[in-house]
Amino acid sequence: MRRQLGWILMVALAGCQSRPVDVGPAQSSAVVGTDAVAASLNAPPNPHWTPADEAILGPVWRGDNDKGQLYQPLWRGGAPALEDYLYAPPDHDCRGQKGTVRIDWDKSANTVHVLVKYEHLPAHPSAARTDGVNYFFNPFHQAPKDVPDGTYRFWIIWGHITGTPLNFYYDASTLKLLGSEIDYPNGPPPNAIPEPFPYFPLVCSQTFNMNPDGTGSHEFTLQYNNVGVEGGAFANSIVTLIPQDLCEAAPFQPNISQLRPYVPKQGWLPKDKGVSWDEVLKGGLNFDTTIDDATTQYPGGVFPYVYSGISFMSGAPVTQGGVPRGSYLSVPPVIQNVSPVIKPIPGGDDVGCQGFFVDPHVTAPRYCEMAH
Protein backbone atom coordinates (compact mmCIF):
# COMPACT_ATOMS: atom_id res chain seq x y z
CA MET A 1 0.00 0.00 0.00
CA ARG A 2 2.63 2.53 1.03
CA ARG A 3 4.67 2.04 -2.12
CA GLN A 4 1.82 3.39 -4.23
CA LEU A 5 2.45 6.94 -2.93
CA GLY A 6 5.00 7.69 -5.65
CA TRP A 7 2.68 6.60 -8.43
CA ILE A 8 -0.22 8.63 -7.00
CA LEU A 9 2.02 11.70 -6.82
CA MET A 10 3.19 11.14 -10.39
CA VAL A 11 -0.36 10.84 -11.77
CA ALA A 12 -1.56 13.88 -9.84
CA LEU A 13 1.30 16.08 -11.02
CA ALA A 14 0.95 14.90 -14.61
CA GLY A 15 -2.41 16.60 -14.82
CA CYS A 16 -0.86 20.05 -14.40
CA GLN A 17 1.80 19.83 -17.08
CA SER A 18 1.64 21.87 -20.26
CA ARG A 19 1.71 20.36 -23.72
CA PRO A 20 4.21 21.08 -26.52
CA VAL A 21 4.22 24.70 -27.63
CA ASP A 22 3.20 24.42 -31.30
CA VAL A 23 0.96 27.49 -30.90
CA GLY A 24 1.57 28.93 -34.35
CA PRO A 25 3.33 32.14 -35.27
CA ALA A 26 0.52 34.54 -34.39
CA GLN A 27 -0.90 33.03 -31.21
CA SER A 28 -0.21 33.55 -27.53
CA SER A 29 -1.46 32.14 -24.25
CA ALA A 30 -2.14 35.57 -22.74
CA VAL A 31 -3.80 38.58 -24.34
CA VAL A 32 -1.89 41.67 -23.28
CA GLY A 33 -3.29 44.02 -25.91
CA THR A 34 -0.29 46.30 -26.37
CA ASP A 35 1.60 47.21 -29.50
CA ALA A 36 4.74 47.50 -27.37
CA VAL A 37 4.82 43.77 -26.59
CA ALA A 38 4.36 42.76 -30.24
CA ALA A 39 6.98 45.25 -31.38
CA SER A 40 9.40 43.98 -28.75
CA LEU A 41 9.10 40.39 -29.95
CA ASN A 42 9.65 41.49 -33.54
CA ALA A 43 12.95 43.16 -32.56
CA PRO A 44 16.17 41.65 -31.18
CA PRO A 45 16.30 41.16 -27.40
CA ASN A 46 16.90 44.48 -25.63
CA PRO A 47 18.76 44.35 -22.29
CA HIS A 48 17.30 47.70 -21.18
CA TRP A 49 13.92 48.04 -19.42
CA THR A 50 11.31 49.01 -22.03
CA PRO A 51 7.61 49.92 -22.24
CA ALA A 52 6.95 46.28 -23.21
CA ASP A 53 8.52 45.08 -19.95
CA GLU A 54 6.31 47.50 -18.08
CA ALA A 55 3.17 46.42 -19.96
CA ILE A 56 3.37 42.63 -20.10
CA LEU A 57 1.13 40.84 -17.59
CA GLY A 58 1.15 37.19 -18.70
CA PRO A 59 3.10 34.70 -20.83
CA VAL A 60 3.14 35.23 -24.59
CA TRP A 61 4.17 32.33 -26.84
CA ARG A 62 5.08 32.53 -30.53
CA GLY A 63 6.24 29.88 -32.98
CA ASP A 64 6.61 26.18 -32.34
CA ASN A 65 9.01 23.77 -30.69
CA ASP A 66 11.61 24.16 -33.45
CA LYS A 67 11.67 27.96 -33.55
CA GLY A 68 9.80 30.29 -31.28
CA GLN A 69 9.67 32.76 -28.43
CA LEU A 70 8.36 33.03 -24.89
CA TYR A 71 8.06 36.39 -23.16
CA GLN A 72 6.53 36.81 -19.73
CA PRO A 73 6.66 38.74 -16.46
CA LEU A 74 8.36 37.60 -13.27
CA TRP A 75 6.78 38.57 -9.96
CA ARG A 76 7.85 38.16 -6.37
CA GLY A 77 6.75 34.68 -5.34
CA GLY A 78 5.16 33.47 -8.57
CA ALA A 79 6.39 29.88 -8.41
CA PRO A 80 8.43 28.98 -5.30
CA ALA A 81 9.02 25.38 -4.23
CA LEU A 82 8.05 23.70 -0.97
CA GLU A 83 10.29 24.87 1.88
CA ASP A 84 11.54 27.83 -0.11
CA TYR A 85 11.90 31.06 1.81
CA LEU A 86 10.24 33.84 -0.18
CA TYR A 87 12.49 36.85 0.21
CA ALA A 88 11.34 40.30 1.33
CA PRO A 89 13.72 43.30 1.36
CA PRO A 90 14.85 44.72 4.71
CA ASP A 91 12.59 47.77 4.38
CA HIS A 92 9.59 45.49 3.67
CA ASP A 93 8.65 47.57 0.64
CA CYS A 94 7.92 45.40 -2.41
CA ARG A 95 6.28 48.08 -4.54
CA GLY A 96 7.31 48.13 -8.17
CA GLN A 97 9.33 44.91 -8.08
CA LYS A 98 9.06 43.20 -11.45
CA GLY A 99 11.10 41.14 -13.84
CA THR A 100 10.68 39.75 -17.32
CA VAL A 101 12.15 36.80 -19.17
CA ARG A 102 12.37 36.42 -22.92
CA ILE A 103 13.54 33.16 -24.50
CA ASP A 104 14.23 32.84 -28.25
CA TRP A 105 14.99 29.35 -29.55
CA ASP A 106 16.04 28.07 -32.96
CA LYS A 107 16.69 24.37 -33.51
CA SER A 108 18.44 24.91 -36.85
CA ALA A 109 20.91 27.33 -35.23
CA ASN A 110 21.18 25.11 -32.11
CA THR A 111 20.54 28.10 -29.84
CA VAL A 112 18.30 28.99 -26.89
CA HIS A 113 18.85 32.62 -25.95
CA VAL A 114 17.66 33.79 -22.52
CA LEU A 115 17.30 37.41 -21.40
CA VAL A 116 16.08 38.35 -17.92
CA LYS A 117 15.51 41.93 -16.70
CA TYR A 118 14.46 43.40 -13.36
CA GLU A 119 13.60 46.66 -11.66
CA HIS A 120 13.34 47.82 -8.02
CA LEU A 121 15.38 44.92 -6.61
CA PRO A 122 17.96 45.30 -3.81
CA ALA A 123 21.45 45.67 -5.23
CA HIS A 124 22.93 43.62 -2.35
CA PRO A 125 20.30 41.21 -1.00
CA SER A 126 20.88 39.30 2.21
CA ALA A 127 18.75 36.73 3.99
CA ALA A 128 18.87 35.36 7.54
CA ARG A 129 16.59 32.43 8.32
CA THR A 130 15.59 31.11 11.74
CA ASP A 131 16.20 27.46 12.50
CA GLY A 132 12.95 25.68 13.27
CA VAL A 133 10.82 28.55 11.97
CA ASN A 134 11.62 29.19 8.29
CA TYR A 135 14.59 26.87 7.95
CA PHE A 136 14.89 23.17 8.76
CA PHE A 137 18.09 21.22 8.21
CA ASN A 138 17.69 18.79 5.32
CA PRO A 139 20.35 16.09 4.80
CA PHE A 140 19.20 15.72 1.18
CA HIS A 141 19.33 19.44 0.39
CA GLN A 142 22.10 21.12 2.35
CA ALA A 143 21.61 24.70 1.23
CA PRO A 144 22.93 27.37 3.62
CA LYS A 145 20.63 28.82 6.25
CA ASP A 146 21.83 32.41 5.76
CA VAL A 147 23.14 34.49 2.88
CA PRO A 148 24.86 37.54 4.39
CA ASP A 149 26.09 38.92 1.06
CA GLY A 150 23.87 37.92 -1.81
CA THR A 151 23.68 37.91 -5.56
CA TYR A 152 21.11 36.60 -8.05
CA ARG A 153 20.69 33.49 -10.19
CA PHE A 154 18.00 32.61 -12.76
CA TRP A 155 16.51 29.11 -13.06
CA ILE A 156 14.61 27.15 -15.71
CA ILE A 157 12.68 24.21 -14.24
CA TRP A 158 10.61 21.71 -16.20
CA GLY A 159 8.58 18.60 -15.54
CA HIS A 160 9.56 15.01 -16.09
CA ILE A 161 6.22 13.64 -15.02
CA THR A 162 5.21 11.48 -17.94
CA GLY A 163 8.67 9.98 -18.47
CA THR A 164 10.44 7.28 -16.50
CA PRO A 165 10.29 8.02 -12.76
CA LEU A 166 13.36 7.94 -10.57
CA ASN A 167 13.81 5.12 -8.06
CA PHE A 168 14.42 6.15 -4.46
CA TYR A 169 15.72 3.69 -1.91
CA TYR A 170 14.45 3.37 1.66
CA ASP A 171 15.90 1.23 4.42
CA ALA A 172 13.58 -1.77 4.80
CA SER A 173 14.07 -1.81 8.58
CA THR A 174 13.77 1.87 9.45
CA LEU A 175 11.81 3.13 6.38
CA LYS A 176 14.24 6.06 6.20
CA LEU A 177 15.37 7.52 2.88
CA LEU A 178 18.83 6.42 1.74
CA GLY A 179 19.01 8.19 -1.62
CA SER A 180 18.10 7.75 -5.28
CA GLU A 181 19.46 5.64 -8.10
CA ILE A 182 21.61 8.66 -9.01
CA ASP A 183 23.30 8.34 -5.63
CA TYR A 184 23.72 4.57 -6.08
CA PRO A 185 24.84 4.11 -9.71
CA ASN A 186 26.02 0.53 -9.06
CA GLY A 187 22.63 -0.65 -7.88
CA PRO A 188 20.48 -0.36 -4.77
CA PRO A 189 22.05 -0.63 -1.34
CA PRO A 190 21.40 -3.79 0.73
CA ASN A 191 18.04 -4.21 2.42
CA ALA A 192 16.49 -1.36 0.42
CA ILE A 193 12.91 -0.73 -0.66
CA PRO A 194 12.66 0.95 -4.11
CA GLU A 195 10.02 3.65 -4.47
CA PRO A 196 9.47 5.47 -7.81
CA PHE A 197 8.84 9.22 -7.75
CA PRO A 198 8.57 11.91 -10.44
CA TYR A 199 11.23 14.60 -10.57
CA PHE A 200 11.94 18.02 -12.02
CA PRO A 201 15.15 18.78 -13.94
CA LEU A 202 16.50 22.31 -13.67
CA VAL A 203 19.30 24.44 -15.09
CA CYS A 204 20.57 27.85 -14.05
CA SER A 205 22.47 30.93 -15.08
CA GLN A 206 25.70 32.14 -13.58
CA THR A 207 25.23 34.65 -10.75
CA PHE A 208 24.64 38.32 -11.56
CA ASN A 209 24.08 41.59 -9.70
CA MET A 210 21.71 44.52 -9.81
CA ASN A 211 22.82 48.08 -10.45
CA PRO A 212 22.78 50.54 -7.53
CA ASP A 213 19.40 51.85 -8.74
CA GLY A 214 17.81 48.39 -8.49
CA THR A 215 17.73 47.64 -12.21
CA GLY A 216 19.61 44.83 -13.87
CA SER A 217 19.68 42.32 -16.70
CA HIS A 218 21.46 39.12 -17.61
CA GLU A 219 21.54 37.16 -20.86
CA PHE A 220 23.07 33.90 -21.97
CA THR A 221 22.76 31.31 -24.74
CA LEU A 222 22.32 27.55 -24.32
CA GLN A 223 22.63 24.75 -26.86
CA TYR A 224 19.25 23.60 -28.21
CA ASN A 225 20.39 19.97 -28.48
CA ASN A 226 22.09 19.81 -25.05
CA VAL A 227 20.49 22.14 -22.52
CA GLY A 228 22.70 22.67 -19.50
CA VAL A 229 23.83 25.39 -17.11
CA GLU A 230 25.13 28.70 -18.43
CA GLY A 231 28.76 28.23 -19.40
CA GLY A 232 28.29 24.54 -20.23
CA ALA A 233 30.21 23.04 -17.28
CA PHE A 234 27.31 20.74 -16.38
CA ALA A 235 24.02 19.48 -17.77
CA ASN A 236 21.07 19.65 -15.36
CA SER A 237 20.38 18.64 -11.84
CA ILE A 238 17.05 17.53 -10.42
CA VAL A 239 14.78 18.35 -7.53
CA THR A 240 11.80 16.45 -6.24
CA LEU A 241 9.55 16.46 -3.19
CA ILE A 242 9.44 13.15 -1.36
CA PRO A 243 9.05 11.71 2.15
CA GLN A 244 12.29 11.10 3.99
CA ASP A 245 10.48 8.59 6.20
CA LEU A 246 7.94 6.24 4.62
CA CYS A 247 6.28 5.93 8.01
CA GLU A 248 5.19 9.58 7.55
CA ALA A 249 3.75 8.91 4.10
CA ALA A 250 0.02 8.27 3.72
CA PRO A 251 -0.79 6.09 0.70
CA PHE A 252 -2.97 7.92 -1.86
CA GLN A 253 -2.70 11.21 0.10
CA PRO A 254 0.58 13.03 -0.60
CA ASN A 255 -0.84 16.25 0.81
CA ILE A 256 -0.98 14.93 4.36
CA SER A 257 2.41 13.24 4.04
CA GLN A 258 5.90 14.45 4.73
CA LEU A 259 7.24 16.01 1.51
CA ARG A 260 10.72 17.50 1.55
CA PRO A 261 13.12 18.67 -1.17
CA TYR A 262 15.70 16.23 -2.48
CA VAL A 263 18.67 16.90 -4.76
CA PRO A 264 21.35 14.32 -5.70
CA LYS A 265 24.47 14.04 -3.58
CA GLN A 266 26.62 14.60 -6.66
CA GLY A 267 24.76 17.81 -7.44
CA TRP A 268 24.98 18.11 -11.22
CA LEU A 269 25.03 15.69 -14.15
CA PRO A 270 27.99 15.71 -16.58
CA LYS A 271 27.73 18.26 -19.37
CA ASP A 272 27.08 15.63 -22.06
CA LYS A 273 23.88 14.45 -20.27
CA GLY A 274 21.71 17.43 -21.21
CA VAL A 275 18.36 17.12 -22.96
CA SER A 276 17.04 18.93 -26.02
CA TRP A 277 15.05 22.14 -25.69
CA ASP A 278 11.90 20.57 -27.19
CA GLU A 279 11.89 18.11 -24.28
CA VAL A 280 12.12 21.05 -21.89
CA LEU A 281 9.15 22.70 -23.60
CA LYS A 282 7.09 19.52 -23.49
CA GLY A 283 7.76 19.14 -19.77
CA GLY A 284 6.10 22.43 -18.83
CA LEU A 285 8.14 25.46 -17.75
CA ASN A 286 8.63 27.24 -14.44
CA PHE A 287 11.11 30.05 -13.75
CA ASP A 288 12.71 31.32 -10.57
CA THR A 289 15.23 33.94 -9.54
CA THR A 290 16.99 33.00 -6.32
CA ILE A 291 19.33 34.77 -3.94
CA ASP A 292 22.71 33.07 -3.69
CA ASP A 293 25.93 33.54 -1.75
CA ALA A 294 28.19 36.00 -3.55
CA THR A 295 31.31 35.22 -1.52
CA THR A 296 31.94 31.56 -2.42
CA GLN A 297 32.86 30.29 -5.89
CA TYR A 298 32.71 26.67 -7.05
CA PRO A 299 33.94 25.09 -10.30
CA GLY A 300 31.49 25.72 -13.13
CA GLY A 301 29.86 28.61 -11.27
CA VAL A 302 27.18 26.47 -9.60
CA PHE A 303 26.79 25.22 -6.04
CA PRO A 304 26.99 21.51 -5.10
CA TYR A 305 23.78 21.85 -3.10
CA VAL A 306 22.18 23.02 -6.39
CA TYR A 307 19.72 25.76 -5.35
CA SER A 308 19.65 28.03 -2.31
CA GLY A 309 15.99 27.70 -1.36
CA ILE A 310 15.70 31.50 -1.14
CA SER A 311 13.24 32.42 -3.86
CA PHE A 312 12.47 35.92 -5.09
CA MET A 313 11.20 36.70 -8.62
CA SER A 314 9.54 33.83 -10.45
CA GLY A 315 6.84 32.78 -12.87
CA ALA A 316 4.91 29.74 -14.04
CA PRO A 317 3.94 29.67 -17.74
CA VAL A 318 3.01 26.03 -17.08
CA THR A 319 -0.26 27.49 -15.75
CA GLN A 320 -2.46 29.02 -18.44
CA GLY A 321 -2.15 32.79 -18.20
CA GLY A 322 0.67 32.56 -15.68
CA VAL A 323 0.54 33.60 -12.02
CA PRO A 324 -0.51 37.22 -11.32
CA ARG A 325 1.37 39.68 -9.15
CA GLY A 326 0.76 39.19 -5.42
CA SER A 327 0.08 35.45 -5.80
CA TYR A 328 2.01 32.20 -5.87
CA LEU A 329 1.50 28.74 -7.34
CA SER A 330 0.98 26.42 -4.36
CA VAL A 331 2.34 22.92 -4.91
CA PRO A 332 0.16 20.95 -2.40
CA PRO A 333 -3.19 21.69 -4.11
CA VAL A 334 -1.52 21.05 -7.49
CA ILE A 335 -0.57 17.59 -6.23
CA GLN A 336 -4.08 17.02 -4.91
CA ASN A 337 -5.63 18.49 -8.10
CA VAL A 338 -7.96 20.77 -6.14
CA SER A 339 -8.66 24.50 -6.30
CA PRO A 340 -7.32 27.03 -5.63
CA VAL A 341 -3.81 26.31 -6.83
CA ILE A 342 -2.98 30.03 -7.08
CA LYS A 343 -3.06 31.70 -3.66
CA PRO A 344 -2.36 35.19 -2.29
CA ILE A 345 1.12 35.74 -0.86
CA PRO A 346 0.81 36.11 2.93
CA GLY A 347 1.70 39.67 3.92
CA GLY A 348 0.97 41.01 0.46
CA ASP A 349 3.33 42.41 -2.14
CA ASP A 350 3.44 46.13 -1.38
CA VAL A 351 4.43 48.17 1.70
CA GLY A 352 4.72 45.83 4.68
CA CYS A 353 5.60 42.72 2.65
CA GLN A 354 7.07 39.91 4.74
CA GLY A 355 9.26 36.87 4.23
CA PHE A 356 7.25 33.69 3.79
CA PHE A 357 8.17 30.04 4.39
CA VAL A 358 6.39 28.26 1.57
CA ASP A 359 4.02 25.33 2.24
CA PRO A 360 6.19 23.26 4.61
CA HIS A 361 5.55 19.53 4.95
CA VAL A 362 8.58 18.90 7.16
CA THR A 363 6.85 16.31 9.33
CA ALA A 364 3.63 14.32 9.31
CA PRO A 365 1.86 11.85 11.60
CA ARG A 366 3.50 8.44 11.81
CA TYR A 367 0.90 6.54 9.84
CA CYS A 368 2.63 3.18 10.00
CA GLU A 369 2.42 3.20 13.80
CA MET A 370 -1.23 4.24 13.74
CA ALA A 371 -2.05 1.02 11.93
CA HIS A 372 -1.14 -1.10 14.96
Image: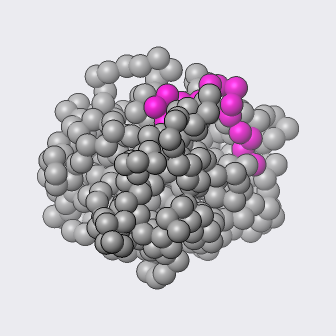
On screen, 220 above or below 336? above
Q: Magenta includes 274?
A: yes
Residue 103: image x %, image y %? 63, 47
In which quadrant will I find the C terminus? bottom left
Residue 341 lies left or right of residue 366; in this view the side is right
**Residue furthest front in the image:** 372
The majority secondary structure of the magenta stretch comes to loop
Please give the name of the residue rendered at 16% of the width and 64% of the height, measured from the top-left corner. Answer: 352
Residue 317 or residue 197, whichever sits in front? 197
Task: Write the start and end of the magenta stretch as one range.
Answer: 264-278
Residue 211 % position (x, y): 33, 35
Front residue of this view, candidates 217 and 253: 253
How many numbered badges does the structure rendering display?
0
Whole-percent x and y of residue 241? 45, 54
Nearest the camera: 120 or 5? 5
Q: For residue 272, what is the image quadrant?
A: top right
> Would you say residue 332 is visible in this rendering?
no
Q: Determine the residue positioned at 54% across, 61% down.
A: 3
Residue drawn 69% across and 68% down? 28
* Residue 190 appears anywhere in the view: yes
Above or below residue 108? Residue 18 is below
